[in-house]
Amino acid sequence: MEYLSPEGLRLDGRRPMEMRQLRAEIGVVPKADGSAVFEMGNTKVIAAVYGPREVENKTHQMNDQALVRCEYSMANFSTGDRTRKPKGDRRSTEISLVIRQTMEACIITHLLPRSQIDIFVQVLQADGGTRSACINAATLALSDAGIPMHDLVTSCSAGYLKSTPFLDLNYVEDSAGGPDVTVGFLPKLDKVTLLQMDSKLPIGILEEVMLLAIEGCKAVAGYIREVLLENTKQLEYRRGG
Amino acid sequence: MRGIQLSLNQTQKLRLQRALDKLDSLSSKRNSNASVTVADTIPVNHEDGVLKGHGTTELGGQVVATLCGVVERVNKLVYVRSLRSRYKPETGDIIVGRVVEVAQKRWRIDINANQDAVLMLSSMNMPDRIQRRRTAIDELNMRNIFEENDVICAEVRNLQHDGTLQLQARSEKYGKLDRGQLLKVPCYLVKRRKQHFHQLDQYGVNLVLGCNGYIWVGELNEAKDIMMVDQPINAQPNSTNEGQANTPAEIRQNICRIANSIRVLATLGFNITMEVIEEIFNLSRSLDFVVHDMLGAEFCVLVAEREAERRSSSTKRKG
């Protein structure tokens, strides 16, 4: 499989440092407090946020901060073969935990004591980078719900094939067995909140790949900011005086 | 557009887009760069000494927003007003809510805020209208006053230090609401006004615009001031006794028509006030729209166009 052609093009015609096309839409689930659909190329993810609302299980209620819950699931039809158990398997539980920790770090929870914030992310189409798309969608949905946050969390993945760092791997490139580094980044505070990697990578190259992923995160942050600003302006204009 | 699943044909799409563009252009002069997103820097004059209010935080000497919304400045206070967040209670607000639980000496009410509100038994008038100490028998008879899933109207009494919201319903105008429907709209569309109770006598409709975004549209109950002093204390104060007939069909139509007007306004994202609701109501009647067609594509487009006209004429009158 020719992951990098002699002309320097990847399997889908991108350059190694090129991201896939981004598309975001806010307000897709009418009943939810905040919701968003985020697409990175063919990967499509929907996120819905409910809250802050009354805690269901009083034993988990925290008197000084909000309780954040997250659930990640993949739709049956999201991958090539129809998956049998979309929730509850180990990968989904792990990704749910990862997304919860990432979002909890950036939500200002002490402003919402005794309440609960539920984040539900579901993958509608999986083509590599689902974790990153989920985090980006969750950020949009939380902003839509009016939940105070320290900063926008953006995420992007990068890999290393044929001695070149690749930005934003799709499913085929991910299945090549090379390393896959996912980075969660706060653009304004300039801090990394999530760093995960599959497979093996020498540490000198890890830094190069991580910096490439951070560049991707900054590009995503620029796009997310535009979408949110446009949405806020629309709501305000339409409301009237 | 958020929430609208309307199948608009080509001309309707064009008309809607034109009306919305007109609305955008009318208001764009006012707040060009007041909208901010999370982690945006808010331009502030540091020499004046600025007070950082809700939705802001300090980062490296700069004032940074933590919410997506519009920046408001009042003298030295700078804060970000978020649009689509949950209801933030203030003392004295009139709200409409649904009973979630009957607990010890209190009812828990869902009011679309961060937590459920609490209505103490002592903050509620007894059915026999006597001002007295609430006994254990009163506590056992709480279900006769409100049960789960009842819709009630009350006023915010206070916000306790731990965030719990306390309501009070000690006046005649508060209490259980029945014979009508409850609508949920985003709470930023309902502004705080002097009057939240509206009685439309000519249509027989009673309208309560709760500040929390819950709106009640129901039948106008003229016989509200029946003195219950003569009734025995243990009698069930039911409002649906056999003597009362069902609501007449015409009033039901009016209730549904007003409710649909509010739904259309909420879908399009326009401010909900009594004048606008009545205007849409009259518009639908004058154009002979059947009540269920009001939620269709054509009426939505008409409402958007009408609102654009109304706003442009009001700005012309001012400017």
Image: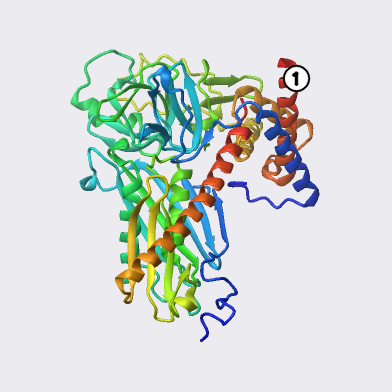
Give the residue number, with chain letter if any, for mark 1.
B316
Give x and y (percent) for residue B118: 31, 30
Front-most of B226 and A227?
A: A227
Q: Which residue is drawn at 78% across and 36% down?
A: B288
Residue that sits furthest to the left in the current view: B136
Using the rendered image of the protein, determine whether residue B252 is visible from the camera's viewpoint.
Answer: no
Front-most of B170 and B61?
A: B61
Q: How is the image coloured?
A: rainbow
Residue that sits furthest to the front in the current view: A204
Residue that sits furthest to the bottom in the current view: A1
Q: Mark 1 lies on which chain?
A: B
B7 left or right, relative to B56:
right
**Crowdedness of circle 1 by 10 Å Cα count: few (<14), some, many (20+)?**
few
Task: Report the label total.
Answer: 1
Give x and y (percent) for residue A162: 45, 80
Using the rendered image of the protein, determine whether residue A49 is visible from the camera's viewpoint.
Answer: yes
Give x and y (percent) for residue B101: 31, 38
Vertical relation: B109 (above or below) A17 = above
Q: Is mark 1 on a helix, strand or loop?
A: helix
Vertical relation: B312 (above or below) A24 = above
Front-most of B223 and B168?
A: B168
A138 left or right, relative to B126:
right
Front-most of B228 and B123?
A: B123
Q: Which residue is drawn at 71% across and 46% down?
A: B297
Amino acid type indicated by mark 1: Lys
Quarter of the picture holding the C terminus of chain B = top right
Q: Residue at x 39, y 29 (%)?
A: B54
Residue B256 is drawn in which quadrant? top right
Give x and y (percent) for residue B80: 46, 30
Q: Which residue is drawn at 35% across and 14% down?
A: B229
